[in-house]
Amino acid sequence: MVKIHSQGSARREQQGDTFLATMASPDECDRAALIDQGRQQRRQAWRAQQAAGCEWLAVGDFGWGDRVLAHSYLVGAATRTEAADAQGFVGPCQVPVFTADQSFALGWEQLFDEVAEAQALGLAVKPVILGPLSYLWLGRSLDPAFDRLELLESLLPVYGEIFARLAAQGVEWIQLDEPLLALELPLAWRTAFERAYNLLQREPLKKLLGVRHGELIDNLGLAAGLPVEGLHVDWPRSVQVQQGLLDRLPAYKTLSLGLVEDAEPGQIGQQRRLQFARQVGERLQERLWLSPAVLSGDADTAQAAALTAEFNTLVRTARQAALATPVAPAEKPWSAIEAALAKLGAAQSGLVAS
């Protein structure tokens, strides 16, 4: 069955930026009020995701209005930050400023608290966090001569700790957002992706690599080949990218498609998406996941209703195509050996009889 999951809520729907800026504030009353405000907003977002039919809800996407800064707190690197308009993210954020002696450590319990909060409500969750390469790319080196990519080896163990903590909470999948893969990358960063994800492969949890806010073109082969269990992309616009995804995706890997707010407009765009939904449903069946559009605060009611209606149509189309396609019988690895033994037995019987 084609699965529906959530990419989270739009940043503009989130409040509480002042919470991150004043974490060290002695005014516990203000902090308590902000924590309660965040809890209420998360539950509203989870209810909206459930109403959209999502079987797995996003946790960790809230980020108190700034996912990059929240991630810096998570990995213990929020000592120095500066304002920036980050690539791959909607709106400005606070990016980390790294030093040559930068250290990382698990520094914030918020992600694990939100997982526990959702689980206490009986919800199935999929945490969404920023991937290690995109996080380092977004940051800046205090010393221009220092290459922040050198910090990768010290950052990855913290990801291992995060995965272990989430696995202990009963989490099955985690989404690692790497919007960096939508850009043209230097060779050193492409090589670093392969090294990092080969190391992370050893850690617990199934991993969904998320490439949002852009199309996989130059790095399609790289992203499809990384040793993770799934790949999430925005709904591809061109037939070339659509076919590339199907051709490059390994047979064991899940493909997740997310409808986007700025999808190709008009009847032609809708027909292309519908045709691709039918094609991937038929080809991938249960290895296909779909995710509804994450609407910004600028989306009007009519636009939201139209995107919701189209997403429901895409889901029905993909599921019907998947059900109409017969599932190939599972191959038995011992069948060839058993056949050879049976043949050998028959031959021996013939020799005895003669």
Image (spheres, helix red, strand yellow):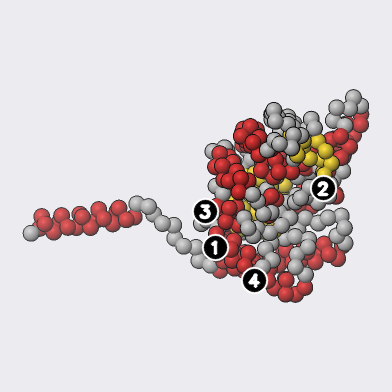
Tell me the crowding category of disc 4: few under 14, some 14 to 19, or many 20 or more residues within 10 angstroms, Cα based.
Answer: some
Q: Nearer the viewer, mark 2 or mark 1?
A: 2
Residue bearing mark 4:
275
CA gap, disc 4 and disc 3: 23 Å
CA gap, disc 2 and disc 3: 37 Å
Residue shown at the point (70%, 30%) measured from the top left: 100
Quadrant where the image shows the C terminus: bottom left
CA gap, disc 4 and disc 2: 36 Å
Q: Amino acid at mark 4?
A: Gln
Residue shown at the point (57%, 66%) measured from the top left: 282
Tell me the crowding category of disc 1: few under 14, some 14 to 19, or many 20 or more residues within 10 angstroms, Cα based.
Answer: few
Disc on res. 247: 1
Residue shown at the point (83%, 55%) measured from the top left: 296
Splitting the image into 4 quarters, where does residue 332 fall?
A: bottom left
Residue shown at the point (57%, 56%) measured from the top left: 221
Residue bearing mark 3:
252
Q: Amino acid at mark 1?
A: Asp
Q: Amino acid at mark 3?
A: Tyr
As helix, strand or loop, the secondary structure at mark 3 comes to loop
Tell me the crowding category of disc 3: few under 14, some 14 to 19, or many 20 or more residues within 10 angstroms, Cα based.
Answer: few
Disc on res. 85: 2
Residue 100 visible in the displayed image: yes
CA gap, disc 3 and disc 1: 13 Å
Q: Position of residue 299 (x, y in %)?
A: 85, 60
Sequence-first disc among 3 and 1: 1
Tell me the crowding category of disc 2: few under 14, some 14 to 19, or many 20 or more residues within 10 angstroms, Cα based.
Answer: few
Sequence-first disc among 4 and 2: 2
Q: Nearer the viewer, mark 4 or mark 1?
A: 1
In the picture shown, does residue 280 fall above or below 204?
below
